[in-house]
Amino acid sequence: MRQKILPRGFLPIMAAATLMAIMAAPVMASPATATRTLPASAASGTGVDVAIHASGCGFMGQVQETLPDGFTYISCTLDDTSVEYEDNTVRFTFLGDSAIFTYRVKAPNVAATTTYTFHGIIKDEDRQEYSIGDSDITVTAGGLVTYVLTMMGGSTTPSRGKHMYYAGSVVNISATASPGWEFDHWSDNVANPASSFTTVTIDSDKTVTAYFSPEGEPVASPTPTGLRTETKIAIAIVVAFAAALVFIVRKFRKRA
């Protein structure tokens, strides 16, 4: 019986062709996933930490959480520019395939023990949405009443952002002007709007904003004028970086 001999080099060529076919074959990407971890219960009016672990998003992703009625978003371990919140919806946008972060909310002040449910979705780089499993938390009655103080505008104490205080607390606040600037006034909700050191009485959720003006000018203005060249360059760099980041985030949100 005559044996058929394969040409020299045939096997390496076949191996290479097979490898190329495998590499060219479409890979089924895993769907984006996220888990939410929070305590089973919390006392009325207290802070609650919610941990998120997201993965499989590709170039960038977004976690969108829907807070139960009565809960208030406070802060997050992500950079502030990555977080957007409105009413009960909080969006956390991040670069990269995965992210691990924790955000804090304030539980509502309740007169009777109540169970609430957190809902959420995760979006991958193609804006495909996947559900995050619901999570329940029971808020028990009997705790002290708390409210949220939101500080805004320049360098302040407490720092910019949201802070929790017990009802009836009197909080000392202060504003520190940057070089070339001077304190002008506070918005309402403070004891003395004209003093950089004053107090806020916590009897409801309140927002306080500090306003500054260039030294020697009596009118408050949020726009820096008369700054040194070095300062202008630094501001321009920061603005350009922020604009680039906003462009990337908006492009992600608007992708079909």
Image (cartoon, grey):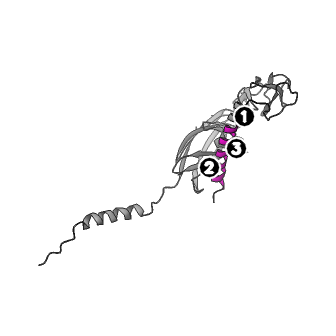
Question: Which tag is nearer the camera, tag 3 or tag 2?
Answer: 3
* Range shown magenta: 235-256
Seen in the picture, residue 66 relative to 11 is either above or below; the reply is above
Question: Which tag is nearer the camera, tag 2 or tag 1?
Answer: 1
Q: Amino acid at mark 1?
A: Lys
Q: Amino acid at mark 3?
A: Tyr
Q: Amino acid at mark 2?
A: Gly
Q: The N terminus is located in which quarter?
A: bottom left
**Residue hosting label 3:** 85
Residue 80 percent across, percent down from the top left: 66, 38
**SS for dot 3:** strand
Seen in the picture, residue 98 relative to 148 is either above or below; the reply is below
Residue furthest bottom as drawn? 1
Left or right: where does residue 199 sit relative to residue 230? right
**Residue hosting label 2:** 120
Residue 232, numbered label: 1
Closer to the camera in the image, 219 or 194: 219
